[in-house]
Amino acid sequence: MADNSFIRHIVFFSAKDKADIDRIVEGLSILATIPGSRCFEVRRNTRQDQLGNDVDVVVYGEFDDAAALEAYKQHPIYQQSIDLVRPLRDMRIAADI
């Protein structure tokens, strides 16, 4: 059985211009410097789907609890990343499970 005692924070992004995907990855990668996550990854989506694939970049983080996730979101680097990425991205879908 899986360990469900922590929060998995997953965010999907699509780029307005595919030429900016590396810049999006770079802008999101600074989030890894925020303390408090158990695990944190920023990756390009490598899935090829014949029905369409709007996801270019995925952020995955694990946090001990809601307070740790909220502290992450309140950190100044979080806003810095938003400022870098928001102009480059089209879609953003987030889920906390």
Image (cartoon, grey):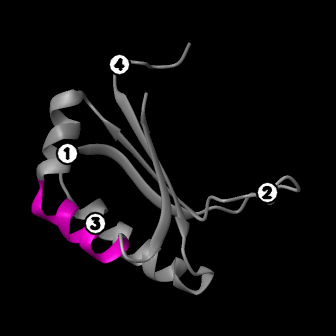
Disc 2 versus disc 4: nearer the observer: 2
Q: Position of residue 66 (x, y in %)?
A: 22, 28
Q: CA distance from mark 2 to mark 3?
A: 26 Å
Contact (CB < 8 A) between labels 3 and 4?
no
The chief SS type of the magenta part is: helix
- Choose between 94 and 37: the one closer to the eye: 94
Contact (CB < 8 A) between labels 2 and 4?
no
In the rendered structure, the answer to whether residue 80 lies left or right of residue 18 reads: left
Question: Where 76 falls versus 94 (above or below)?
Answer: below
Mark 3 residue element: helix
Q: Is residue 76 magenta?
A: yes
Q: Which residue is mark 1?
A: 36
Q: CA distance from mark 3 to mark 1?
A: 19 Å
Please state which amino acid type lies under the numbered disc 1: Gly
Q: CA distance from mark 1 to mark 2?
A: 35 Å
Q: Which residue is mark 2?
A: 52
* Res 5 label: 4
Which region shows up in magenta?
75-85
- Choose between 16 and 95: the one closer to the eye: 16
Q: Residue at x 52, y 83 (%)?
A: 20
Please state which amino acid type lies under the numbered disc 3: Ile
